Structures are given as C-alpha cells and as structure tokens.
Amino acid sequence: MRGYIHVYTGNGKGKTTAALGLTVRALGNDLKVYIGQFMKGQRYGELNTLERLGVPVERFGTESCIIGPGDVREIDRIKAREGYERVKEILLGEEFDLVILDEICVSTYFNLITQEEILHLMDIKPEGTELVLTGRYAPKEVIEAADLVTEMREVKHYYNSGVMARDGIER
Ligand code: ATP
Ligand code: MG
C-alpha cells in the first residue's frame, strides 16, 4: 500500500489528538506505528496508553516548556538534533507503517529543526510508509510538499479565558 504524507497544523486544538486517533485506527488494522515527539519531555496521559499497547514513543524534548524562540537552550538543540538523526534511522529502517512526528512543524519555528531537514525526511520516506507531521506554524514548503494538509482553525479556545492544560484532556 502506498503511504502518503499528512500535515496537521494551525492554532486550533486537535493536531496531536488527530495523530493519536489515527494511531488507534492503524493499530486496529495491525499496522506498526512509531511516534517521535519533538520538544516534549513532560508526562502526557497518552504515553501510559501507548506503552500498554506496545507502541514505541521516543521523546526529543525536556520537561520545561519553551515559550518563545528566545527561551531555547543548548539542551533543547541537542535533543532536537538527536531526534532528527533518530527519525532518519526510523524512516530508513522501513520497520513501521505509520510514522508520527509530533510537533516537528513547530520545532522549525523555534529554529530547532530546519525546513530543509523536514523536507529531507519527507524525501527519504519509504514508499509504503504513511508519515504524519504535526505542530503549529508548518512551513509553506512543507505544506506544498505534503499530500494531505489539515489546518485546525481556532474558532474558540478556553485557553484564552485562562483555562490551562488539563490532565486527560490536553495532556
Ligand atoms: P491537542 O494535543 O489537544 O490535540 P494540539 O496538538 O492541537 O492540541 P498544540 O499546539 O500542540 O495543540 O498545544 C496546545 C497546548 O498549548 C494547549 O494544551 C494549551 O495549554 C497550550 N497553549 C498555549 N498557547 C495557546 C493558545 N494560544 N491557544 C491554545 N492553546 C495554547
Ligand atoms: Mg500538539
């Protein structure tokens, strides 16, 4: 089966949850799924679930949140570098049917991964692998090179009324 490249971007809620929903569907069809999460080191609820399901999740971030490009530390760069090298190996290994690179788009906004690097990953994707890239601020060239692009548009978000991320719903 030919695999395609998806991008889930935009400011509205649902990018990571869409990728996780696709994971549930893929597993139900016996596809092998790999998830690499850029810029994330915090404990999210889905990690417990994915662990039980035997889905490998590798994380290329730290515990602390990066709020703006000015907050990026050396450790964030090192982790993102490790992540990039690792996901290249994962793609070239051709072991997985569905490869999800969560928040890789937003990591270009923080200058942790370049747009050319994402394009390279898209380029080396094996024919049969479905590749999903998530995160706000997907670069224009990445959007152009993808096969399926969904922009989550924020119509309303309770974040703007001061409701912070909640366990089980946002994390
Ligand atoms: P989800 O994981 O729920 O599917 P998402 O992947 O679409 O969400 P992200 O951009 O990865 O969304 O992260 C959203 C998180 O960032 C929220 O949980 C929220 O707490 C926080 N956040 C920071 N700024 C905003 C904002 N302006 N609007 C919405 N969420 C924001
Ligand atoms: Mg997300």
Image (cartoon, rainbow, N blue to C red):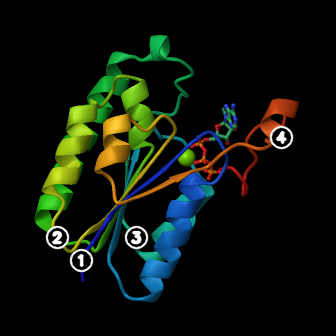
Mark 1 or mark 4, which is nearer to you? 1
Q: Are marks 2 and 4 in contact (CB under 8 Å)?
A: no
Q: Which residue is depicted at the point 38% across and 45% down?
A: 143
User: Outermost residue, right direction?
Assistant: 161
Q: Give the left or right position of residue 149, taking residue 114 as reference.
A: right
Q: Secondary structure at mark 3?
A: loop
Classify mark 3: residues with Cα within 10 Å, few (<14), some (14-19) or many (20+).
some
Mark 3–mark 1 Cα distance, whole angstroms, equals 22 Å
The front one of 93 and 11 is 11
Query: Which of marks 4 and 2 precedes in the sequence?
Result: 2
Query: Which of marks 4 and 1 precedes in the sequence?
Result: 1
Residue 82 is tagged as: none
Is the CB of the residue bearing disc 3 within 8 angstroms of ligand 1?
no
Mark 3–mark 2 Cα distance, whole angstroms, equals 22 Å
User: Outermost residue, bottom direction?
Assistant: 29
Residue 110: x, y in percent?
41, 23
Q: Secondary structure at mark 2?
A: loop
Mark 4 or mark 3, which is nearer to you? 4
Mark 2–mark 4 Cα distance, whole angstroms, equals 40 Å
Q: Are marks 4 and 3 in contact (CB under 8 Å)?
A: no
Query: Which of marks 1 and 3 precedes in the sequence?
Result: 1
Task: Provide the residue designation for mark 1.
Answer: 2
Task: Provide the residue designation for mark 4.
Answer: 158
Query: Which of marks 2 and 3 precedes in the sequence?
Result: 3
User: Outermost residue, top direction?
Assistant: 70
Residue 55 is tagged as: 3
User: The N terminus appears in which quarter of the rendering?
Assistant: bottom left
Q: Amino acid at mark 4?
A: Tyr
Residue 92: x, y in percent?
12, 60
Q: Are marks 3 and 1 in contact (CB under 8 Å)?
A: no
